[in-house]
Image (spheres, grey):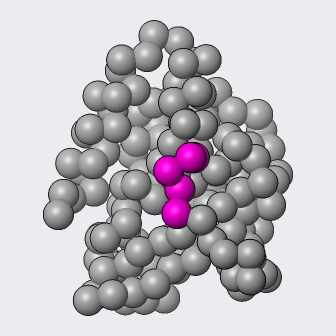
């Protein structure tokens, strides 16, 4: 299995192929179509990510010491962002996820291309991922 940093490097290469932010947004939204969806019955207060502009959810399962997340969002961009983040961390140990700096977000300059409310949502999703990882250490 690839490390988070290896997956991050691959995504950075992918983003480098797109010359402008419209193409990058489309790429992120396309990733949302690959997102393992949380079944409706699991969309509840325990899985809801607080602080997102559009309702978003994260659920985690631990298997053989590794974490596997599922997520969803009512927003296509939110769904894409969640998918991108989960692609990086799924199948990793709780310790690796809890200690990951989500450098990809800074490297592609995503926060500067989001509205203030979407930026808060991004930060909320990352915070919730780290919380869930720490709970599983």
Q: Give the residue displayed 58% in from the left and 77% down from the top.
A: 59
Can you give x and y, in whole percent of width and height, for residue 38 in the image? 63, 71
Within the magenta stretch, is there residue 31? no
How many numbered dots are placed on residues in this image?
Answer: 0
Task: Where is residue 135? Give x, y as percent.
Answer: 48, 88
Residue at (39% x, 87% y) in the render: 62
Left or right: 109 in relation to 47: left
* Side of 74 relative to 80 (left or right): right
Magenta span: 32-36
Q: Quadrant of residue 100?
A: bottom left
Instruction: Look at the magenta stretch and give its main secondary structure.
Output: loop
Q: Residue furthest top?
A: 19
Counting from the top left corner in percent of width and height, residue 68 is at 41, 74
Looking at the image, the residue that sits furthest to the left is 1
Name the foreground residue: 93 vs 62: 62
Residue located at (33% from left, 87% from top)? 63
Whether residue 120 is visible to the viewer of this picture, yes or no, is no
Q: Considering the image in quadrants, where does the N terminus appear?
A: bottom left
Is residue 57 or residue 106 the one in the foreground? 57
Determine whether 104 is above or below 130 in the image: above
Q: Position of residue 97 (x, y in %)?
A: 37, 69
| Occupied quadrant, residue 91 | bottom left
For the point 67% across and 48% down, which residue is it?
78
Q: Is residue 66 above or below residue 112?
A: below
Q: Is residue 39 left or right of residue 107?
A: right
**Where, quadrant-wise, is the C terminus in this rendering?**
bottom left
Examine the rendering and report whether any part of residue 49 can be seen.
yes
């Amino acid at each position: 299995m690839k490390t988070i940093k290896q997956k991050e490097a691959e995504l950075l290469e992918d983003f480098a192929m797109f010359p402008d932010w419209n193409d990058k947004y489309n790429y992120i939204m396309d990733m949302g179509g690959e997102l393992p969806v949380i079944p409706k019955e699991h969309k509840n207060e325990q899985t809801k990510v607080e602080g997102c502009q559009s309702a978003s959810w994260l659920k985690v399962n631990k298997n053989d010491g590794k974490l596997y997340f599922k997520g969803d969002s009512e927003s296509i961009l939110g769904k894409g962002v969640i998918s991108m983040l989960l692609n990086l961390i799924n199948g990793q140990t709780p310790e690796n996820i809890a200690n990951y700096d989500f450098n990809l977000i800074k490297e592609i300059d995503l926060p500067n291309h989001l509205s203030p409310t979407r930026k808060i949502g991004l930060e909320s999703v990352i915070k919730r991922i780290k919380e869930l990882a720490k709970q599983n250490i």
